[in-house]
Image (cartoon, helix red, strand yellow):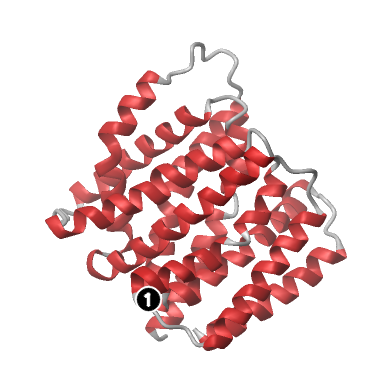
Amino acid sequence: MSFAGKGWGSGLLGVVIFSGSLPATRVAVAGFSPLFLTCARAVIAALLGGVFLALLRQKAPARSDLLPLAIVALGVVVGFPLLTALALLHITAARSIVFIGLLPLATAIFGVLRGGERPRPAFWLFSLLGSATVAGFALLHSDGGSLAGDGLMVAAVVLCGLGYAEGATLSRRLGGWQVISWALFLSLPAMALLALIQLPASWDGIDAAAWLGLGYVSVFSMLVGFVFWYRGLALGGIAGVGQLQLLQPFFGLLLAGLLLHEPIAWSMVAATGVVVLSVAGAKRFA
């Protein structure tokens, strides 16, 4: 299999893992404050990443890599988790999908600005079509919005797109899992201090669902998913592989249908078909 093919396969696996992030965050913020949740998930993931770095004796990043790693940390370790957690206090997980549909486009734009990629004009048409399809589908299946919640999601998408593109560019030199592990490790002192400051006043009222949500976003959303995602972006191209995020909402809805026996509407099937064609077109012209 070619490097590009491996990149798309790895990226798809990352998207599958990320598909549970927003629902898990929605559950977790019912028991934890958004700031504590953001810090705790970063601390847990950083400790796991640090263990891997030590066991595999990874060389410390060069001084020139520290600023890009700080940008990665700002985008995906702090910015996106905190802003989405705050947004989900105001809007539903379903409505947040409206903005997640814009994330592939944001990633592609930063891939051009930070990664030096130059997709062909047809790529942008397919990217816009896919983003509009996801946003339109989510709007039809969500309740009313909130100005505060919507604004926080827009900011989260911008920071996340920047973090994805910067991390993918850096992964070409350091490796995918190394990038997210070093970014987490560098943010560990500040995140640990804030987590201690934001400790819940009482642990008694936190149910099992909130703990499971914290566990998922800490291990899978914050670490394991990025191992595959950054590898995919680095091998297959930031702009192209980034379009796979358009499938993320539909993976989440499909899991809900299979595991929770929720009905799958015809509109979901139709929207998924359009998105698959959009991703295929974006792959062709990326």
Which residue is nearer to you in this view: 258 or 4?
Answer: 4
Horizontal side, residue 191 vs residue 217: left or right: left
* Image coordinates for residue 87, horizontal then vertical, percent: 60, 39
- Label 1's element? helix
Q: How many marks?
A: 1
With 101 as the anchor, is 168 left or right in this view? left
Image height of 64 relative to 183, above or below: below
Residue corresponding to mark 1: 235
To which quarter of the image does residue 267 belong? bottom right
- Which residue is pictured at 60% across the width and 62% down the height? 102
Q: Position of residue 250 (x, y in %)?
A: 69, 61
Q: Could you tell me which residue is drawn at 36 percent across and 21 percent down?
A: 196
Q: Residue at x 54, y 86 (%)?
A: 121
Q: Is residue 250 above or below residue 260?
A: below
Label 1 amino acid?
Leu
Q: Nearer the viewer, residue 196 or 44?
A: 196
